[in-house]
Image (cartoon, grey):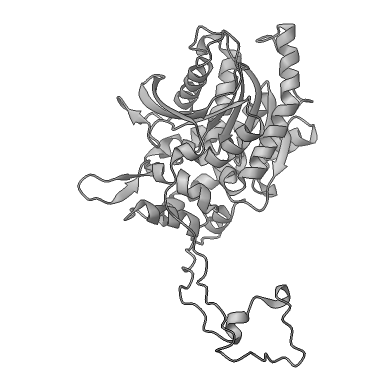
Amino acid sequence: MSDLQRNLMKGKLPHLDEEESHQPESAGVKGLQGLGPIAGIKPASGELNLPADHQFKIPLRPPKQKSYTPTDWSTYWTHTATAALSTPSSLYKIYYTPPTDSTNTWFVFHHGAGSSALTFSLSAKLLHDAIPHVGVAAYDARGHGHTAATGDDSDLSLATLARDFISAVAYLADLSDEEKQAEVVFVGHSLGGAVVTEAALKLDEDKQSWPSPRPRPLISGVVVVDVVEGSALEGLAHMRAYLGTRPSSFRTVEDAIRWHVKSHTVRSAESACVSVPPLVRTQDGSGKLVWRTELGSTERYWQEWFADLSSKFLRARAGRLLVLAGTDRLDKPLTIGQMQGKYQLEVLPEVGHFVQEDAPQRFAGLLEGFWGRNRRGAALERAAGQLGERRDGDHEVLY
């Protein structure tokens, strides 16, 4: 489990690291500490014979400081759009980089609770750079980020979120001028993993769930990132305690970014600079920045989000990939499924909960390899005209 969850289970609260000292070391022996064998300095006597100060001076360099300046979305995505999707309607903020050819193939990402689409910025750009003919897209879920409600957006039930995701996929599939069936890989982090799994089952079992006149997409893969039913349900008991450890407000966006990095919520400052700004908003009248999404108000959905997730994931008729940040998260159904070879399991033990932000290069590489294996099975299925007629287990060896 992640460091944060482990500490919460022990009754500990996350703490902030002290800011690095801005005081440079004085000239002399201390100024040479850390050079060691790199500079070839190893006096036999154990003492340093320094030249006269007027002959040689050691430059004083302050410690390198991390930048917490917000980064614009356009650094990682080529397009953005605001689209009215789903019911009840909201104006969804979508970020995407389209395929460079007419294949109409997409990776569609869904973020976790309290997060935003831009959590996938670095990994999505790296993935598209590696395979440019595949598009990448993510959107802010209702009640999150820059998605704006046109009515009541408090309905965050799993069924509603899955319907929203299907509508977003239809929007992206319709961007192509060609009447070609879209091929998609669903990728969801945390709550997003439950959403994309639910959406994949819905599209497979209910033909009426597809809102576009175009053919339903071919789902060549479902990727769930750092969420397992057993651990998630167990962790819900500590969610209130976790929420109590977060600051209620920030003075500036830079402060919000700094808190995420210093608390190890996001371990990459580069990623935090683009993913954190949509998580806060200006509070009316106070000028302070408060959380965009009030997670405490979603408590009535917590159990529903993750219940039966493992069995749903194993039933998904597509290639299946589970990416975890720790080896102690598998519950019994997933352990059995792993032993039977029903899905691909990848564990990145040196990252936190936000796998896609902490290790974007490795995460993008996993997605690239996963797609490369499963697209062959998808192509065969398309050629045979078997979309919608697949049997359970068809993809179990293709993960």
- Residue 6 in the image: state x and y as whole percent: 58, 56
Please name whichever residue, 307 or 146, is drawn nearer the observer in this view of the structure: 146
- Residue 337 in the image: state x and y as whole percent: 74, 33
Is there any visible trace of residue 391 in the rendered image? Answer: no
Vertical comparison of 151 with 253: above or below: above
- Residue 71 in the image: state x and y as whole percent: 44, 46
Please name whichever residue, 335 or 22, is drawn nearer the observer in this view of the structure: 22
Residue located 42% across and 40% down the image: 299
Residue located 64% across and 44% down the image: 361
Residue located 46% across and 23% down the image: 164
Please name whichever residue, 248 or 106, is drawn nearer the observer in this view of the structure: 106
Q: Residue furthest left?
A: 285
Q: How many marks?
A: 0
Q: Residue furthest front?
A: 55
Asked which quadrant contains residue 129, the reply is: top right
- Residue 55 in the image: state x and y as whole percent: 59, 87
Residue located 73% across and 24% down the image: 374
Asked which quadrant contains residue 199, the reply is: top right
Is there any visible trace of residue 372 in the rendered image? Answer: yes
Q: Quadrant of the C terminus?
A: top right
